[in-house]
Amino acid sequence: MVQIKTPEQIAKMREAGLVVAAIHAATREAAVPGATTKDLDEVARKVIADHGAKSNFLGYGGFPATICTSVNEVVVHGIPDATTVLKDGDVISVDAGAIVDGWHGDAAFTAFVGGGHAPELIELSRVTEESMWAGIAAMKSGNRLVDVSRAIETYIRRQPKPGGGRYGIIEDYGGHGIGTEMHMDPHLLNYVSRKRGKGPKLVPGFCLAIEPMVSLGTPHTEVLSDDWTVITTDGTWSSHWEHSVALTEEGPLVLTAVDGGRAKLAELGVTAAPDPLA
């Protein structure tokens, strides 16, 4: 069953989303050469504590940290530690979440550590982020879940990949419903699958974490022996972007974006819903 939220509940999710946005800002600044992924986790812990929020990652299924730090060929669920030292040219995806009064926020971004990044890596992150926004723009009343999947996949497939070939849209992981739990129905594929059908109709109160994960090569992944870290099977590097989004009577509200998604959605011809906390 899909959990439909009231405007008051969406306002609480917006509070949690702004904590996630603060985590993103602080960890992005901390992701410099010489820092360890544990350093970033400690930064995130402090932000959560300073906001009086709770972590929804720490302890989830036994996960031992506050954020996921996925470096280079790691797609998702990388565990922060003191031995992974960031260096010039690395790419890191930080996935973070927070709980406020029982309501969840969840979002991820890809950052470039230092300099010296190949143009194809910069383009990979751009394509992944823009595909996320294409999916967000498809969150319209009357659309179905598959329309969000189609928007994400269509954007990615229309982008020429430097050096030829196709981007790998990760198949085993995708977006999800969010609300009183971090992961809820429905599961959101980042591509269209006839086996899944059209999915539920989007109505006001529908909340999704939209999160494309894309690699420079394969769409296939494997999990390492720690039972968390997910890598591409061919070792190609990847990008991960995510926002939690609520569909309201007045359009989509990007719960984990500082401006509620107003500026980016305007570029796409979509009016973001008013911020309930403004």
Image: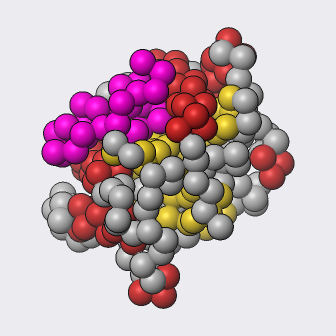
In the depicted view, which residue is nearer to us: 33 or 129? 129
In the depicted view, which residue is nearer to us: 224 or 96? 96
Magenta stretch, main secondary structure class: loop
- Would you say 143 lies left or right of 243 here? left
Most extreme residue toward the bottom, as rendered? 195
Q: Position of residue 142 (x, y in %)?
A: 35, 65
Q: Is residue 266 magenta?
A: yes
Q: Where is residue 164 in the image (x, y as percent from the top left)?
A: 18, 67
Visible in this render: residue 209?
no
Q: Is residue 60 magenta?
A: no
Residue occupying image coordinates x 29% and y 51%: 137
Give the extent of the magenta segment: 252-278
Dividing the picture into quadrants, the one containing residue 267 is top left
Dividing the picture into quadrants, the one containing residue 48 is top right
Residue occupying image coordinates x 80% and y 52%: 61
> Height in image: 140 above or below 20?
below
Q: Where is residue 118 in the image (x, y as percent from the top left)?
A: 26, 43
> Height in image: 193 above or below 17?
below
Q: Position of residue 28 (x, y in %)?
A: 46, 24
Q: Quadrant of the C terminus?
A: top left
